[in-house]
Amino acid sequence: MTDTTMRIDGNTLLLPGGAAVRFIRTLRLPETGTHALPPGLGEFPVRRVADYAESVPEAWRARGGVMLPVYLREAMWLSFAGTREPAALQVGVGKVCAVSGRPWSDRPARDPQNYLVLPRQPWLDGINSGKGTVRQFVAVPLGLGATVEGQVTGEEVWGGVQLQSFPLTPEALARWREEERERLRAERARFSARTAGFGAAPAMAAPPAPGAAPAAPGGAPRAAAAMGLGVGGSMRQEVHQDDRPLTDWSERPAGRVFVHLVTPPQWRSITGEAPPPSPVDRAAYTRAGLPWFDHYDQDARDLEPADALRSVKPVGDWLGDDHEPWQPPSPHQVKPLGDARGKPVEDGDW
C-alpha cells in the first residue's frame, strides 16, 4: 500500500512519492549585480504545528503543516537532495507560484510551467525572474507590501511557503524505473571497464554542494502568518524545463504542506526552543576563503523568466539600504558543481 502521509525526518520534509525538501540558511546577496550560488550554512529547524497546538495562533492550527524560524532579511534556499523518484513539485510564496508567477494551482500546468522537476532540479534559491537567474528568497514581515505575494497580488494574506508534489502516473513510473535499471547497468559496465586491472577503486567523497556546511561543502490570516518571502539579489541558477509530456504526471497531488515562517521571538514563545544564531556576516565568510558555487547542467533547458515575477522589487526598496558590507569572492573560491520515517505532518484548510 502506498504511503500518502507527509512526514518530517530530522529537518527534512518527506512528501509522498519520494520528494524530500530541506530549508537551508545562507548568505544574503547584494541586491545589485549577478552572483555565484551562496553556500549552505546549516538547516532551518522544522517543527510540526500539531505538536504546539496550544501555543500557535488558531489560523495555524486550521492550516496545519510545519513552521520554521527566520530573521528579518534572512536568506534561504530549498534543497531537494534525497529525492528518490521523479516528482513535480510546486513551490508557492504566499500562494504565488515561484516558477510561473501565477496564482496557486491544484494541478501541474505548462505554458507557463508551474512546477519544478525533481530530482533534476537540485535546489531552488529564489523566484524565476530572469534568464538563467533567480532572485534570492529573503524573509520580510507581512504588512509592508515587500513580499512577492504583496507585489504580485496586491494583498498580503497568506505568507509562508507552500509545497505540493505530484508523482508520475503508474505507467510513466514503470517506464522510468526500467530506464533507470538500464542506465545503472550501463554505468556499472563503464566503471568495470575503466577500473579493470587496477584493483578496487578508492572511496571518494561526493563533490561539495551548497547544502553542506562551510567546513565540509554548500485579520486573522495576517496576524497568524507573520512572515513571508520577498526577494534579494540575483544569482546564476536555471529553473529546468520539463522534458516529459504533461500527461506523465498525476493530475492530483500526492501531498501538500503549508510552511509557516516564524520570527525568532515567536519561535521561542511557541516552542520554548532557542532560535538559531543570527545569520553569518557575508564579508567575514568571504574573507575566510570559504567557497561559493556555480552549477552547470549541459543537458538541461532553462525556463523562460516569469513575466509576473520580473517586476518584483527587492526588499531594500521597502526596508532601506542594505548596510552589510559586501566583499565579492575571488575566482578560486567559486567551486563548480557537476553535472527514517518521522511523525506525520497534518494538512489543513488553506
Image: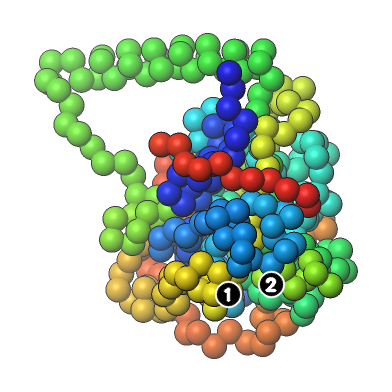
Please state which of residues 206 and 333 is positioned toward the viewer in this rendering.
Answer: 206
- Decide if residue 118 is in sight here: no
Q: In which quadrant of the rendered image does the N terminus lie?
A: top right
Residue 67 in the figure: left or right of residue 12: right
Which residue is identified by label 1?
Answer: 266
Q: Is residue 166 above or below residue 92?
A: above
Please state which of residues 236 and 225 is positioned toward the viewer in this rendering.
Answer: 225
Residue 261 in the figure: left or right of residue 182: right
Q: Quadrant of residue 255?
A: top right
- Dot 2 lies on which element? loop
In the rendered image, residue 61, in percent from the top left (x then y), is placed at 69, 57
- Contact flag, marks 1 and 2 (Cβ < 8 Å): yes
Identify the residue shown where x is 79% and y is 66%: 221
In the rendered image, residue 158, in percent from the top left (x then y), is placed at 77, 62
Identify the residue shown where x is 52% and y is 11%: 178
Which residue is identified by label 2?
Answer: 226
In the rendered image, residue 344, in percent from the top left (x then y), is placed at 56, 41
Residue 23 in the figure: left or right of residue 144: left
Q: CA distance from mark 1 to mark 2?
A: 9 Å
Near mark 2 (Cα within 10 A), the count class, few <14, some 14-19 or many ≥20, is many
In the rendered image, residue 324, in percent from the top left (x then y), is placed at 50, 84
Identify the residue shown where x is 48% and y is 61%: 44
Please state which of residues 128 and 86 is positioned toward the viewer in this rendering.
Answer: 86
Disc 2 marks which amino acid? Ala
Identify the residue shown where x is 41% and y is 36%: 340
- Dot 1 lies on which element? helix
Q: Nearer the viewer, mark 1 or mark 2?
A: 1
- Nearer the N terminus, badge 1 or badge 2? 2
Disc 1 marks which amino acid? Gln
